[in-house]
Amino acid sequence: MNIQNIDEILQSQKEFFQSGKTLPVSFRVDALKKLRESIKSHEDEIAEALTKDLGKSAFEGFMCETGLTLTEITYMIKHTRKFAKEKRVRTPMAQFASRSYKKPSPYGNVLIMSPWNYPFLLTIDPLADAIAAGNTAIVKPSAYSPATGEIVRKIVEECFDQKYVAVITGGRRENSALLDKKFDMIFFTGSQSVGKEVMRKAAEHLTPTVLELGGKSPCIVDDTAKLPLAAKRIVFGKYLNCGQTCVAPDYILCDEKIKDKLVEEIKKQIVSQFGASPLDNPDYGKIINEKHFARVMGLIDKDKVVIGGGGNAETLRIEPTVMTDVTFNDAVMGQEIFGPVLPVMTYKKFSDVFDMLKNLPKPLALYIFSGDKSRIDAVTSRLSFGGGCVNDTIIHLATSEMGFGGVGESGMGSYHGKEGFDAFSHTKSIVDKKTWLDLPMRYQPYKKSSEKLIRKFLK
């Protein structure tokens, strides 16, 4: 894709949007229906692409990507008409006689840049929200997941003219070229380092931006937790997609009294869910590439490993690994792990949790396993994080009824369902002033009688 092609596509999309063709709700819903049917017809190809890029089984690919994408599209088909309606609000007496209302309007031409770890879900999901809101879109899949990027391109081109939705593939050169252009809105999912660059580029054009980033998401386990169930759910969330999930529990912070028992339960669950030889499990995924394989392996301290620790450079697989006696000074705590390595840290008393976490960067997710409601309320109220679960992991993002997004270093803005529609919309505030009455009090020359009325209205 050369730079001239990008300019041509961008210009054609601007013209298409300005024509008003994306504004009717019926047009948007028809587009979503067409997208849904195309995805259904290509389910096998999507599954094959996800297996090729990330080693995902067909079951996991549907459960965590294709199925969730279809759920979001169906939700938007059902609700877009309601979301797009004008909403009347109360008008102050000082503005009598008039009607006040809020009118959702699409931003225009949006850029969606997606990551490689859930390359189908995190591309098509925001695209569905953008379409529902009435935008045109340029989609840029990650170069690290080329097979999925190709099926995304195939589906989009099958459904839409590129003046409406276009896919641009490629690597850093294409990313840079796109970010140099002026869009009406940018939606980015990826690392914090790249997110900062996206925001810098967007600032040059004062472009509104949604950033879905990551971070080190803590998993707190106290002495009232049901440890066998906690271990089962932690292992599921941590090692899903070979640990390459932005909301995976990054590390455990548990009561020192239950650490040994919890670790034993986690070890049992690793064997139960992945087998005695996880590297031979056909349903266990792989690291995306050699660079990330070497990075994750470099975070493993063999002296602190209690299970796992091995890897196969040829298959890019790393065993589900648990490390104990970890401190914040260890390499594994210096960055988001984004791999199947689970450090376990401890606290002496529950109040220590707040002292240990309060000054850390705000994570995308936080999890607490506890049977103590007061502790749960304290954690969910006092600590800042994007979203999370009580007595489970990662499932909070699998719904269109709640927004998903980060805070602080883990991102800004949210999407899914109504929040997704709003993320790709600007809400205009409009007053429709009637012409059959025009109160004179606001006009000069000002009078004492007018001042009294104004004060009465505005108090």
Image (cartoon, helix red, strand yellow):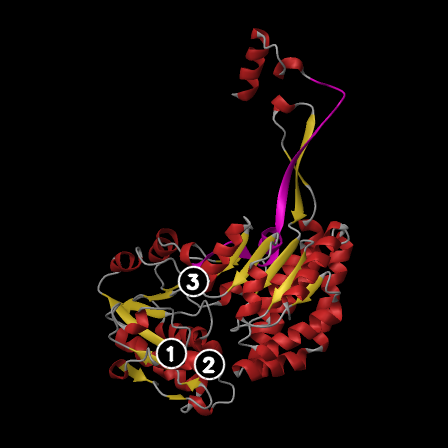
Residue 371 or 436: which is nearer the viewer? Answer: 436
Q: Which residue is mark 3?
A: 365
Span highlighted in magenta in the image: 410-438
Q: Which residue is mark 2?
A: 287
Q: Are marks 3 and 1 in contact (CB under 8 Å)?
A: no
Q: Which residue is mark 1?
A: 296
Image coordinates of residue 127 in percent, x first then y, are: 64, 62
Q: Amino acid at mark 2?
A: Ile
* Residue 371 included in the magenta stretch of the image: no
Viewer-nearest of discs 3 and 1 = 1
Q: In the image as oriented, which residue stretches furthest toward the top?
A: 448
Q: Quadrant of the N terminus?
A: bottom right
Q: Are marks 2 and 1 in contact (CB under 8 Å)?
A: yes
Q: CA distance from mark 2 to mark 1?
A: 9 Å
Image coordinates of residue 399 in percent, x first then y, are: 56, 62
| Mark 1 neighbour class, 10 Å CA radius: few under 14, some 14 to 19, many 20 or more | many
Image coordinates of residue 378 in percent, x first then y, are: 34, 53
Give the quadrant of residue 305. Answer: bottom left
Which residue shows up at 62% across the image and 23% down it? 93
* Residue 426 included in the magenta stretch of the image: yes
Q: CA distance from mark 3 to mark 2?
A: 22 Å
Q: Is residue 408 left or right of residue 417?
A: left
Q: Amino acid at mark 3?
A: Ala
Label 3 or label 1, whichever comes before in sequence order: 1
